[in-house]
Image: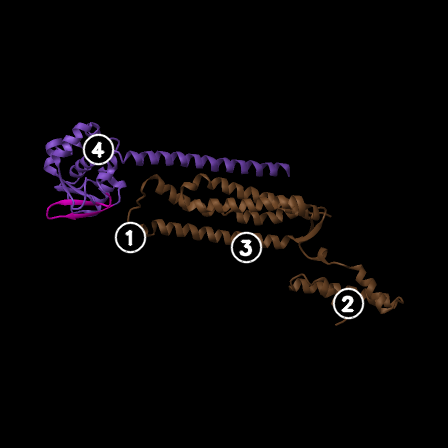
Chain colours: A brown, B purple
């Protein structure tokens, strides 16, 4: 394999070799080869021509479909802020519901997760933030969009599954044997409603994944 | 940025406030429950409503009998149960001594438990309180002689009047002597 082909391959190494990437790679290689031949025809040695061609293109990120350059610090900071706000909101909702056994462990688990996330957020602002301030990175908006769609589909399936399961647990035998529904008092009713309601709180997961696309567009830089 | 940080801090404060509030409420509930449980161990403050669900025609229903006596003042003493359907007798075997309980408390609680047992279990004829040092047997007819129609006691005012009478130590001692058949065990004193 010639040096130019190897160089072009190295530029595309971090990308999955889809047909679009292969076409783009071929196009970049053809253009650079044509440029190299022109330089040789103009009197440059093959090594000098290769060096000039190589220096003319050092990255291909801007050529990839859906790639945008973003302000990394602002993107990460706002994403963490929204994550903390979402988790805290869910935690606050679960606190009064802790009288129900099924919520008790979840509430403590959330408090623990929030504590870790909060400590990391402070560390990010103090230490890592300094390192990546003014740093720009390429992110792929199409990838974020795809991930968001997949997470929403998975969450919808989970929610539907838990809804059906809860209904089967509480009313399965009533439906199957045509027996009247019997609920022993307000606590039993509350417990049942909580079991329907709890899976809904996981809506913060697709929400957090959905933030990536919105924030990438918000913090896009030239 | 600052607005979101403020929201984070505000939510954190609300969450911590909620946690402390729920702990306070739970502690208050616990105190109320504890006070209620303590009151259930005292004959003069025992709640009739807590034993009414165990009203039964037949003493043959052992779980019901056990539940009933587990909700009566003597329930804080480790014990096990047995029953004799031939003589319509329910027996409570305590793991401690009667003398260790204190004379006045023992008399009041045996009288109260007997009234409750006979009033709620229709065909129960005899109750045996078997301690490691002594055994007390109480019969329905003796209790009825002292308190009249026991079923008539099963309302708040009559029940409360009966509980009030148990505050008078002299009366309790007299009735207890009249209604109980006391049997000392060998090698024990008291």
Q: Crowding at label 1, few (<14), some or many (≥20) Cα neighbours within 10 Å?
A: few
In the image, A19 versus A47, the foreground residue is A47
Q: Crowding at label 3, few (<14), some or many (≥20) Cα neighbours within 10 Å?
A: some
Q: Could you tell which of marks 1 and 3 lies nearer the N-terminus? A: 3
Q: Could you tell which of marks 2 and 3 lies nearer the N-terminus? A: 2
SS majority, magenta: strand
> Cα distance, mark 1 to mark 4?
57 Å
- Is A5 situated left or right of A49 in this image? left
Residue depicted at 13% across the width and 48% down the height: B85
Mark on residue A177?
1
> Which span of residues is magenta-colored?
B79-96
Marks 1/4 same chain: no
Mark on residue A150?
3
Instruction: Residue B6 in the image: state x and y as whole percent.
Output: 60, 36
| Disc 3 and disc 4 in contact, CB within 8 angstroms | no
> Cα distance, mark 1 to mark 3?
38 Å
Q: Quadrant of the C terminus of chain B?
A: top left
């Amino acid at each position: 394999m010639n040096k130019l082909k190897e160089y072009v391959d190295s530029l595309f190494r971090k990308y999955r070799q889809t047909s679009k990437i292969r076409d783009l790679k071929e196009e970049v290689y053809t253009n650079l080869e044509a440029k190299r031949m022109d330089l040789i025809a103009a009197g440059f040695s093959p090594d000098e021509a290769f060096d000039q061609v190589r220096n003319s293109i050092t990255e291909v990120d801007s050529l990839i479909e859906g790639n945008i350059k973003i302000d990394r610090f602002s993107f990460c900071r706002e994403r963490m802020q929204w994550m903390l706000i979402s988790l805290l909101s869910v935690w606050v909702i679960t606190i009064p519901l802790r009288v129900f056994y099924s919520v008790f462990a979840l509430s403590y688990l959330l408090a623990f997760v929030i504590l870790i996330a909060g400590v990391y957020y402070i560390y990010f602002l103090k230490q890592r933030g300094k390192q990546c301030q003014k740093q720009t990175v390429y992110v792929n908006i199409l990838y974020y969009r795809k991930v968001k769609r997949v997470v929403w589909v998975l969450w919808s399936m989970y929610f539907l599954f838990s809804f059906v399961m809860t209904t089967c647990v509480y009313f399965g035998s009533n439906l199957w044997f045509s027996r009247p529904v019997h609920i022993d008092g307000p606590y039993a009713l509350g417990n049942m409603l909580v079991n329907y309601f709890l899976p809904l709180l996981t809506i913060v997961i697709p929400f957090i994944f959905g933030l990536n696309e919105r924030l990438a567009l918000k913090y896009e830089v030239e | 940025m600052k607005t979101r940080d403020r929201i984070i801090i505000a939510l954190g404060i609300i969450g911590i406030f909620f946690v402390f509030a729920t702990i306070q409420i739970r502690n208050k509930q616990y105190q109320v429950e504890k006070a209620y449980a303590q009151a259930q161990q005292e004959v003069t403050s025992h709640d009739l409503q807590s034993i009414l669900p165990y009203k039964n025609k037949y003493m043959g229903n052992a779980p019901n009998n056990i539940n009933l006596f587990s909700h009566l003042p003597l329930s804080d003493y480790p014990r096990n149960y047995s029953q004799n359907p031939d003589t319509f007798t329910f027996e409570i075997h305590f793991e401690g001594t009667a003398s260790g309980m204190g004379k006045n408390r023992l008399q009041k609680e045996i009288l109260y438990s007997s009234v409750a047992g006979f009033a709620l279990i229709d065909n129960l004829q005899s109750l045996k309180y078997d301690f490691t040092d002594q055994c007390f047997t109480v019969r329905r007819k003796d209790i009825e002689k002292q308190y009249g129609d026991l079923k008539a006691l099963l309302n708040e005012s009559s029940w409360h009047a009966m509980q009030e009478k148990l505050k008078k130590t002299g009366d309790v001692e007299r009735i207890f002597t009249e209604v109980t058949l006391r049997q000392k065990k060998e090698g024990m004193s008291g």
